[in-house]
Amino acid sequence: MTAEQVYARTEPHRRACEAREVLRWPLPARRIYLADVRRLRGDAAADALQDEITRQWRASRPTAIKK
């Protein structure tokens, strides 16, 4: 197994992929999904996913919006 294959099986990689998918959805659908994640996986998982979604969204915006 290569290093890339190992990384692809990690929680950060899974969360990044999930965040990319959720970012494609309309905002109301994202909110529902995050509420479901919070209910099913807990606050820590929902907060981590929200942080990753926000990070990816900021990275895709012009530099004036990045913090």
Image (cartoon, grey):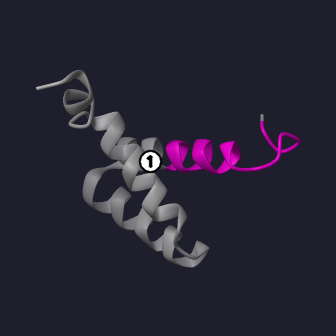
Quarter of the image that includes the N terminus: top left
Query: Mark 1 sits on what residue?
Result: 49
- The image shows residue 8 at horizontal and vertical percentages of 26, 37
- The image shows residue 29 at horizontal and vertical percentages of 50, 76
Inspect the image, locate mark 1, and give the three-letter code of the amino acid beneath it.
Leu
- The residue lying toward the viewer, choosing from 67 and 36, is 67
- The image shows residue 24 at horizontal and vertical percentages of 53, 68
Q: In terms of secondary structure, where does tag 1 sit?
A: helix
In the displayed structure image, the side of residue 59 where residue 35 appears, left or right? left
Q: Is residue 61 a member of the stretch shown in magenta?
A: yes
Tell me the magenta residue range. Answer: 50-66
Quarter of the image that includes the C terminus: top right
Q: Is residue 55 a member of the stretch shown in magenta?
A: yes
Residue for point 57% across, 77% down: 28
**Furthest residue in direction top, as rendered:** 3
Q: Quadrant of residue 64?
A: top right
Residue for point 27% across, 29% down: 4
Residue for point 54% across, 62% down: 23
